[in-house]
Image: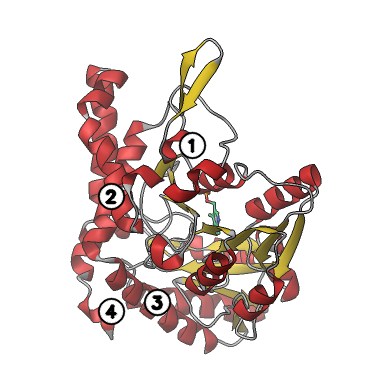
Amino acid sequence: MSTLAFDIDTARKETPGCETVVHLNNAGASLMPQPVLDSVIGHLQLEARIGGYEAAAAAAEAVDGVYHSAARLLGCSTAEIAVVDSATRAWDLAFYSIPFRHGDRILTSEAEYASNFIAYLQVAERYGVRIDVVPNDESGQLSVAHLREMIDERVRLVSLTHVPTNGGLVNPAVEVGRVAREAGVLYLLDACQSAGQLPLDVNEIGCDMLSLTGRKYLRGPRGTGLLYVRAARLSELRPPMLDLHAATWVSRTGYRMRDDARRFESWECNYAAKIGLGTAIDYALGWGIDAIRARVTGLAEDLRDRLSELPGVRVRDIGAQRCGIVSCTVDALPADAVKATMAERGINVSVSRAPSTRWDMEARGLAEVVRVSVHYYNTVDEVEMFCRALGDAVLRSGR
Ligand SMILES: *Cc1c(COP(=O)(O)O)cnc(C)c1O
C-alpha cells in the first residue's frame, strides 16, 4: 500500500499534537506542524520586540513568499492571489463581486455548504436571481450530464463545492470546468476541504475563482484563507468593498483599483498568521500533494472498511471518488454522545448536522453524522483505536 512509502515517523515527530491527542478532526482544523508554529510565534515575538509595522517590513520577503507559495499550490500567477482571513471571506468576496442581473441563474450542487447557499438565497432575494441545484448522479457526485443539460444563456455562475464538509465525496471539478468553459460561464470552486489533501491546478480545473482555508488539510493557522481570481476575469468582477490597500485615492473625486487580485484584500491583516499560511503551504508541497492524497485516501478507505464491519455502525459516504473525510451514524448513539465518548479517550472527532449541508442531508434522510477525518500523520493504529473505542461504546449502549 502506498501509505507505507510515507515517512510517517518524521511527520509525527514534526507534529507536537500527535503526543497528546488522536486527532481525527482534520476537516475541522488539522494539527499544525512545528515549522508553522515556529513561523507564527516567531513573527509575533518580532512584533513584540521591534514593533508591528517594523516587523512587517523586516519580514517583507516572507510575506511576499506567501503569494509565491500559493501560486505554486494552485498553478497560477502571484497576481491572481488574495490572502484573506477565512475561506468564507474569500468565497464571499468572489461571489458578491459578480454583477448579477434580474433573471440570472446560478447552478450549484447538492453538496453545497450552508454559508454558500445562504449567500445564493440573499442574492436571489436582492436581484431576482434563480438558484438551480444540479442533481447528483447514482454515485452521489454532481451529475455532469445534468449540468450540461441545465446550462443556458441565462446561467451567470456555476458554483461548486469540491469536497463537502462531510460525506467523503469529491465532486468532479475538472469535468464541471469543461462545461463551464464551453459555455463561457463564470465558475467558482469552494476548495476549502480539498486544499492540502488533493491536487488543485486552476488551469486543469478551469475555474475562474477558487477559495480555500488555511486551517484544514493545509495545516495552517486559524484565521487564514486564500482567494484565487483568474486574471482574465478580474475586470468583470466588482469587489464589494475597497480600502486604501485595494485602491488608491488618486484625486478628490477619483480612486484607482489595484490591477491584481489583491484588490480583494484589506490593508490590515494578521501578519503572523499570513506568514504561517505560507509556511504551511510550503510544508505541504514539501511532502507532495500526490503523496498526501495517496496516504490520506488509503487511511480513509481502511477506516471505512473497519467501520462497516462494526454492528450498528453505518458509513454514510457517497461519490465515485472519495477523500479523507469519513462520515458515519451509529444506530444506538446520537452523534454528540459518540463525540463525547471519544473525547474521554483522547480521540477528536466532530459532528456535522443537516443545516451545514441541507440539500444533501435531507435527500439522504440524515439529521446528523459523526465526521471522522484523517490526515497523513494519522496511523493505522489510531484508526484501529478509534474503531475499538466505537465498538465498545456501541456494546455498552446495548446493555
Ligand atoms: C469549512 C468550510 C468552509 C468555511 O471555511 P472557513 O475557513 O471556516 O471560512 C467553506 N466551505 C466548506 C465546504 C467547508 O467545509
User: Looking at the picture, how far across and down is residue 339, in whole percent?
Assistant: 56, 63
Q: Which residue is mark 1?
A: 264
Disc 1 from disc 2: Cα separation: 18 Å
Label 1: how many residues lie within 10 Å, few (<14), some (14-19) or many (20+)? many
Disc 3 from disc 1: Cα separation: 34 Å
Disc 3 from disc 4: Cα separation: 9 Å
| Circle 3 SS class | helix
Which residue is drawn at the image coordinates 19% and 70% (left, top)?
7
Which residue is drawn at the image coordinates 24% and 30% (left, top)?
60
Q: Which mark is residue 3?
A: 4
- Residue kind at label 3, given as amino acid type: Thr
Q: Which is in the foreground here, disc 1 or disc 2? A: 1
| Circle 2 SS class | helix
Nearest the viewer among 184 and 126 is: 184
Does the beta carbon of the residue at mark 1 sit less than 8 Å from ligand 1?
A: no
Disc 4 from disc 1: Cα separation: 39 Å
Q: Which residue is mark 2?
A: 69
| Circle 4 SS class | helix
Label 2: how many residues lie within 10 Å, few (<14), some (14-19) or many (20+)? many
| Circle 1 SS class | helix
| Count of numbered tags | 4
The C terminus lies in which quarter of the figure? bottom right
Disc 2 from disc 3: Cα separation: 24 Å
Residue 332, can we see it?
Answer: no
The residue furthest top is 252
Q: Which mark is residue 297?
A: 3
> CB atoms at circles 3 and 4 under 8 Å apart?
no
Q: Earlier in the sequence, mark 3 or mark 4?
A: 4
Answer above or below: position of 160 versus 248.
Answer: below
- Residue kind at label 4, given as amino acid type: Thr
